[in-house]
Amino acid sequence: MSVSRARNLLTVTLLAALTACAPHAGPATSTAAAADYGPAPEFTLPNVAGGAFTLGSHRGSVVVLSFTAANCTEECPVLEAILQRAARVWKARGTLDRGVTIATMEIDPKTNGMAAEAKLRAKWWPAPGWAFLRGDAAHTTAVLNAYHILVLPPPKGHDDVEHTVEVYVIDPQGRESDILAPGANLSLAALERAVERAYKPSGKT
């Protein structure tokens, strides 16, 4: 992992705090230019809607990759609200599922089965352009490790795991261009800017 990517991951993680399912700390915006953190780790996972989602098959478009637990009730709904608003904007522009694809991955498949993930999809976005992914424990762990998503067992008295919730914006060349997080630098405006930068990393029109 490059020094710049490690630095950014540490900053986002500290700002978002480990308790991604803890109360939201309030929005912030990102104004930094697009960065190149290197190639996004490749993966293939089952899509709840059917078939499989392979990151490499989305070259030429931007992928907004997020991580959640279907039974998360605190911070994940903040992520849900932002992504839903973004999806509506991109759908209205005709870019969702053409120029931009959202992919949300289940981080706790041992607790949340396919039925729970299908229910999450029905609630969040039961339409094309937003893939909901759930693999087995081994494949899930491999992807989480590749993207440095930290998952810890539920604290005493809770059912949902603690986890970081970075959102990766992956450019059309398959490289990580932005890393955002609720409570740190993720908002609708920041996400829209990040997607625009992913298409125009040099600032060219």
Image: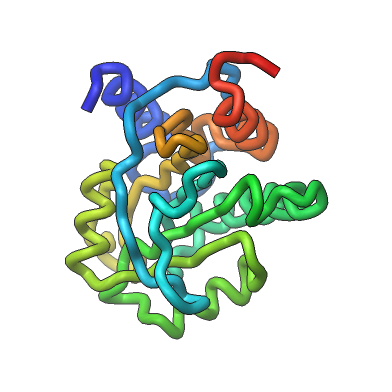
Relative horizontal placement of residue 21, taking residue 62 as reference (left or right): left
Q: Percent position (x, y) of residue 120?
A: 53, 73
Front-most of residues 23 and 150: 150
- In the displayed structure, 37 sits above or below 47; it is above
Q: Percent position (x, y) of residue 58?
A: 48, 50
User: Can residue 21 be seen in the rendering of this structure?
Assistant: no
Q: Percent position (x, y) of residue 23?
A: 50, 48
User: Can residue 149 be seen in the rendering of this structure?
Assistant: yes
Residue at (55%, 30%) from the top-left corner? Answer: 198
Say which quarter of the image contains residue 110.
bottom left
Residue at (49%, 35%) from the top-left corner? Answer: 171
Q: Residue furthest left?
A: 138
Front-most of residues 203 and 178: 203
Residue at (36%, 46%) from the top-left corner? Answer: 164
The quarter of the picture where the C terminus appears is top right
Q: Percent position (x, y) of residue 41?
A: 29, 44
The quarter of the picture where the N terminus appears is top left
- In the displayed structure, 25 sits above or below 202; it is below
